[in-house]
Every structure is written in structure tokens, then in C-alpha cells.
């Protein structure tokens, strides 16, 4: 098999997955505004440092419990957005959701294990989907030119 063709198909699968997962996050963010709610409680709130070759970012880690139909569930999604932030933003999020805080949990009506504390989307979510789709389209056009 020609290496160019192999690289094209691997890239197509990767960019296709990236576009699909970004679009799914956007869709769930939009849908979450209409999800049912339950009362929950934050059981853990901390900041994790994430190092990469691009620098250091910070990830707010918020774990909460909530009960649906007598079953206690655990969630960790604050929002359907990027999860790496500056230290100040991560600190604001963990201060808003300190351990012991009573919270409103939005959960998927058919799969209550999928939950979020802040429903909706941001411009950043939409930008990622557009970016992923542009890259996927560019990759397909590159494949047609080869």
C-alpha cells in the first residue's frame, strides 16, 4: 500500500473522530439546557496542573454526587467546554464548587449518568467544531488532490 494513501486514511479517521466528538459535545451542551435537574453535593474540588510542551495549564476537578430514582450517582463534568484554563479561572471554578456545596445537577433524561453542573455551550465550543470541520474538509481536499 502506498504510504501517502495510508497516511491519508489515518488522518481522515483522526480528523473525522475529532469533528464528531466536538460536534457531540456541542449537541449535548445545547440539549443540557433542557435536561431535568436533581440536587447534588460536591464531594471533591481541586486544581490539577497539566504540563505539556506548550506550557502549563490548570484543570479544575469537581466531583459531585446526586440521586436519581434511589440510585446515588457521581459526576465530574462542570461544563461542556474546554477543561484546561489559567490558574485564576480554575481557582474561580473550584471556589464556586467547594467541597460540601449543594449544587443543581443537570442530567440526561435517558442516561442519568451523563450530567453537568453548568448547562449550555460557549463560543469556544462552536469554534472548536468549526475548526475540526475545516480541518476535516481540508484533509479530504488534500486527499482528492493526491
Image: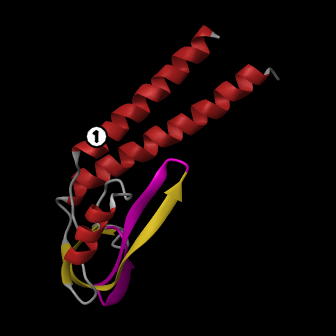
Q: Residues within 10 Å of mark 1 (few under 14, many from 20)?
A: some
Residue 124: image location, x then y, percent: 28, 44
Q: Provide the residue designation for mark 1.
A: 126
The residue located at (59%, 36%) in the rendering is: 13
The residue located at (30%, 45%) in the rendering is: 125
- Residue 7 shown left or right of residue 108 in the figure: right
Q: Secondary structure at mark 1?
A: helix
Residue 49: image location, x then y, percent: 45, 67
Picture quarter with the N terminus = top right
- Residue 86 shown left or right of residue 20 in the figure: left
Picture quarter with the C terminus = top right
Is 29 in the magenta?
no
The residue located at (21%, 86%) in the rendering is: 101
Comparing 38 with 132, the one in front is 132
Comparing 84 with 145, the one in front is 84
- Residue 4 shown left or right of residue 140 in the figure: right
Q: Is residue 118 visible?
A: yes
Quadrant in the rendering for residue 42: bottom left
Residue 63: image location, x then y, percent: 36, 79
Residue 67: image location, x then y, percent: 29, 86
Q: Which residues are magenta?
A: 53-77
Instruction: Work out whether 99 lies above or below 46.
Output: below
Q: Is residue 68 visible?
A: no
Quadrant in the rendering for residue 9: top right
The residue located at (31%, 69%) in the rendering is: 115
Predominant secondary structure, magenta span: strand
Q: Residue furthest front?
A: 55
Is 54 in the magenta?
yes
Instruction: Work out whether 92 lies above or below 56.
Output: below
Quadrant in the rendering for residue 133: top left
Amino acid at each position: 500500500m502506498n504510504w501517502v494513501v495510508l497516511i491519508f486514511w489515518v488522518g481522515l479517521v483522526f480528523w473525522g473522530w475529532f469533528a464528531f466528538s466536538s460536534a457531540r459535545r456541542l449537541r449535548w451542551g445545547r440539549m443540557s439546557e433542557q435536561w431535568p435537574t436533581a440536587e447534588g453535593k460536591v464531594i471533591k474540588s481541586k486544581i490539577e496542573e497539566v504540563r505539556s510542551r506548550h506550557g502549563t495549564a490548570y484543570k479544575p476537578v469537581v466531583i459531585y454526587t446526586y440521586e436519581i430514582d434511589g440510585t446515588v450517582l457521581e459526576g465530574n463534568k462542570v461544563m461542556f467546554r474546554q477543561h484546561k484554563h489559567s490558574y485564576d479561572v480554575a481557582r474561580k471554578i473550584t471556589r464556586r464548587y467547594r467541597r460540601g456545596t449543594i449544587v443543581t445537577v443537570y442530567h440526561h433524561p435517558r442516561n442519568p449518568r451523563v450530567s453537568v453542573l453548568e448547562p449550555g455551550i460557549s463560543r469556544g465550543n462552536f469554534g472548536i467544531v468549526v475548526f475540526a470541520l475545516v480541518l476535516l474538509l481540508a484533509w479530504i481536499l488534500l486527499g482528492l488532490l493526491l
